[in-house]
Amino acid sequence: MTYDAIVIGAGAAALFFGALNKDKLNILMLERNDRVGKKLLTTGNGRCNYTNTKLDENTYNDKDFTSYMIEKYGYEAIVEKFKAMGIYPYMEEDRVYPMSLQASSVLDVLRYENDRNNIDIKTDVFVKSFHKDGDIFVLKDQNANIYKGKSLVIACGGAAMPKFGSDANLFKQIKELGISVIDTKPALVPYECDYKYLKHLDGLRVKAKLSLKKAGKIIKDDEDDVLFTKYGLSGPTVFQLSRYIKGKESAYKFSIDFFYTFTEEEMFTLLSERRKDIGHKSLDEFFIGLIHKRLIIPVIDRLGLAKETLAKDLSENNLHKIVKILKDFELDIIKNKGYGIGQISLGGVATEEINAKTMESKKVHGLYFIGEVIDIDGPCGGYNLSFAWLSAMAAYDDIRSRWKA
Ligand SMILES: Cc1cc2nc3c(=O)[nH]c(=O)nc-3n(C[C@H](O)[C@H](O)[C@H](O)COP(=O)(O)OP(=O)(O)OC[C@H]3O[C@@H](n4cnc5c(N)ncnc54)[C@H](O)[C@@H]3O)c2cc1C
């Protein structure tokens, strides 16, 4: 039998695509895992941050590509479609979760909706190859079974989570069709850093401004939690900045501003007053109450003075140096923690080669891409799942207009 459309993968984007099939097109979905939507269960720490009230094309790496779908569907369509399936939104600031606070609810409603829409889902089917024979796409799985479809939707994800099946295995096939694929790289990921006090600081979480620097210039910054680990830095700020680290990672540095609500002058004044008020204290005592206990030794080490030095003996220069240490605490980056740890991968099918209104390839008629397989990435906060839903809506609308009886 020849299907109206075959979807490769049954992750977030694919399942949402199937859930839209009110017109009951003849759709086959092929998933290599034994179950659908495995990765979806892990999203948002098991709570699934499925969208964001501030959805905006500027948050993505390619606003020209995302602006049409955000204008046409956007946050409203995502919330409305999920509400129609029984998922009511629960907001934590701008992040949107299901009221049940369970990612499994999102997966369950999607599964039921796919059943209701007669999507033919086959699990344990690893698509090994596909080609176009005339107007028909022909797919072959690991057991040489053949599947045929009038449209092909590739929803195989990126490279981010090999253990859940998303490992870029189809990128070679896609390239063989003459379609450009941008190299992948882990993102929303922690980083290994080179710093002698990491073991000492392991587990310390601070609210700070984290900047990403290259050749002394700030590329991007973010204010939120910074988490020290025994290997480097993690936490929301590191995840957000990871999207901006391109090429040689060791060319970048992180810089932590522990006092981002103070200007340098205000910080200098505060330290001067402190020197006056508690000048009789040695340095290891002087910092107590100002910074976290575990930061005291690393700060004194950077200052290069003995911990027994009395605060009243600190020169103006010393105070300026302390300001610099506390507001520009640099760490050298070694490398990211890799696929399987990072939440998404950068890269994927080049956006210039996809019609931004329909998700159809500009090179192969009838071939569509949805979700993370496309070279689109967004920050933490529901933006990446939002792109999966939005691209699925765009592709479904086009395919429906083509095959609806
Ligand atoms: C731990 C974690 C937490 C996250 N939390 C959030 C969050 O809260 N909010 C948010 O917006 N984003 C979050 N993300 C990102 C989000 O999960 C992804 O952006 C999203 O899942 C991408 O959807 P997708 O359908 O494109 O790809 P995937 O969900 O990766 O699905 C691809 C599917 O294709 C299958 N497949 C691959 N190759 C083949 C093949 N050859 N044959 C058959 N099947 C194949 C895979 O097995 C997989 O099931 C998180 C990611 C991780 C890893």
Image: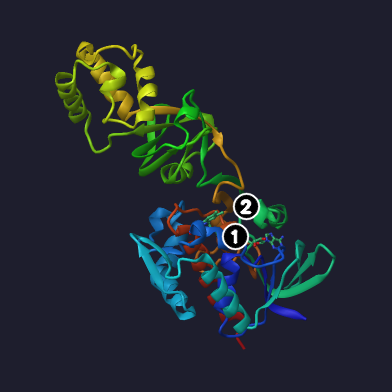
User: Residue 228 lies in what quarter of the image?
Assistant: top left
**Label 1 or label 2, whichever comes before in sequence order:** 1
Q: Amino acid at mark 1?
A: Lys
**Quadrant of the rendering where the C terminus is positioned:** bottom right
Callout count: 2
Asked whether 4 or 9 is in front, the reply is 9
Q: Residue furthest right?
A: 144
Q: Residue at x 55, y 68 (%)?
A: 104
Q: Which mark is residue 39?
A: 1
Please say whether residue 199 is visible from this viewpoint.
yes
**Quadrant of the rendering where the N terminus is positioned:** bottom right
Q: Residue 15, position in %: x, y?
A: 59, 71
Q: Residue 217, position in %: x, y?
A: 38, 30
Q: Which mark is residue 405?
A: none
Q: Is residue 69 above or below residue 241?
A: below
Q: Is residue 133 above or below residue 269?
A: below
Residues under numbered marks 1 and 2 in contact, where contact means CB atoms less than 8 Å apart? yes
Q: Residue at x 81, y 62 (%)?
A: 142
Q: Residue furthest bottom?
A: 405
Residue at disc 2, CB closer than 8 Å to ligand 1: yes
Which residue is denoted by mark 2 in the rendering? 161
Asked whether 18 or 311 is in front, the reply is 311
Classify residue 278 as left or right of residue 196: left
Q: Is residue 173 above or below residue 116?
A: above
Q: Residue 374, position in %: x, y?
A: 57, 57
Q: Amino acid at mark 2?
A: Met
Q: What secondary structure is found at the residue carrying circle 1?
A: helix
Q: Residue 34, position in %: x, y?
A: 72, 65
Q: What secondary structure is found at the residue carrying circle 2?
A: loop
Residue at disc 1, CB closer than 8 Å to ligand 1: yes
Q: Residue at x 55, y 51 (%)?
A: 344
